[in-house]
Amino acid sequence: MSRFTVDRDGETYVRPIEGLELTRRQAALGLVGLVLLLAVPDITRVTPLSFSIIHQGILFGLAAVGLNLLLRHTELVSFGHAAFFGAGAYGAAVLAHHYAVSSGLVLLVGGVLVATVVALVVGYLVAGYLDIYFALLTLAFNQVLFAFVLQSRYFNFNDGLAVRPEGTRPLLLGLELSPGAYSVILYYVTVAFLLVMLFAMWKIVNSPFGRALDAIGQDRTRARFIGIPVERYVWIAFTISGLYGGVAGGLFALLQLHVRPEPVLFVFVSGEILFMAILGGVGTLVGPVVGGVVLIYLLRLARFYVEYYHALTGIVLLVVVFLLPKGVLGSLPEIGDGLARRRREPGLLREDAGSVAESIRDGAGRAVSTVRIVVFGVK
């Protein structure tokens, strides 16, 4: 038996690193996903897919990975995570625009520091709140930051700031690159950050700290009774979550080379980041990244193909909530098992058709009853 495989309950698991065990199917899917991720520049060169939009989707998905730490483990819903994404983007933009910093790495570090400090302050103020109060407070801080930047001459109002120190692109790896090389190198820098931060998140959620967050999410009072410093742990988790948003925002500034308030700080962007986590699968590590790519693609390109594109994201959310409550990636194992069962037992398809027909019949019956009550009243 190889050190990279382990047998348990009659099944062989792949163990790429200590503590992480995957079924063969999961390992194969992960390998395919990694190859596709690395091949995106080549895939978009020979297909109609947009390289820039996929890159943007990955960055917003990275911010959603951070948000998912709160959502999945502490069961806190934040409507303000665009604040950290925007703080990261504006931190890089201010260094480039006002101080002519040309190093992409320094711009990114500056953006991350700004976002982390903002997350530290906001997290300290909201860590003791729950449910709707927590959600509204994060929303309020996001809106305050958005309004402050929008009305500030230092941030150039609604026109925003260019991320072009001395009129050129920032240096990547110490090199001044052509536009094509810049976008490809920056993409692979993003992929490197993504892989490292996914690994870091996996280590966090599987550490004693991550278990404590789970306990806090299940019952704060009980967690406090067993000695967990609840507010401090929520504060730390909130700051880590904001740091992820800051990294994503800083890289977004380097990609777009211009930062404006609405695309990065508006409260609707916070809703979109939350939607990405739900769409991809709250219960998964990589799901928010998948959700980010899918949703950004819908938001950026649907207007060219669908007349009522504003309704499209709402319809997608309805489909996910009603039919895929575990998200796109989280539902894949169940979908795969269901399809495999139906290949073995074709008779199940007839039962599925019967179930669908019965659901439609019941729904129509309830609709008729509702209309009758509305028109004739209850008798």
Image (cartoon, rainbow, N blue to C red):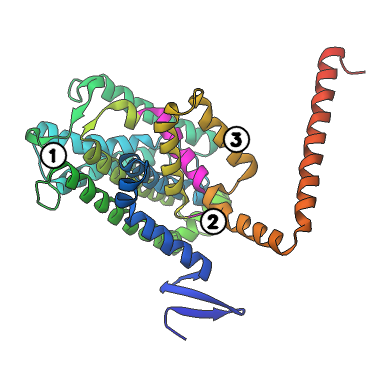
* Residue with the mark numbered 3: 318
Badge 1 or badge 2: first in the primary sequence: 1
* Residue with the mark numbered 1: 169
Query: Magenta includes 276?
Result: yes
Residue contact at pointers 1 and 2, CB within 8 angstroms: no
Query: Magenta includes 116?
Result: no
Residue 142 or 57: which is nearer the viewer?
A: 57
Q: Tell me, for residue 30, which label it has, or none.
A: none
Q: Main secondary structure of the magenta part?
A: helix
Separation of disc 1 and disc 3 at Cα?
41 Å
* Residue with the mark numbered 2: 215
Question: What residue appears at the point 38 percent right and 50 percent down from the top-left corner?
Answer: 236
Please provide the residue range marked out in magenta: 266-284
Quadrant of residue 223 within the rendered picture: bottom right
Question: Mark 2: which amino acid?
Answer: Ala
Can residue 128 be seen here? The reply is no
| Front tag of 1 and 2 | 1
Quarter the C terminus occupies: top right
For residue 46, above or below residue 149: below
Residue 277 or 153: which is nearer the viewer?
A: 277
Q: Position of residue 265 (x, y in %)?
A: 34, 30
Can residue 348 be seen here? The reply is yes
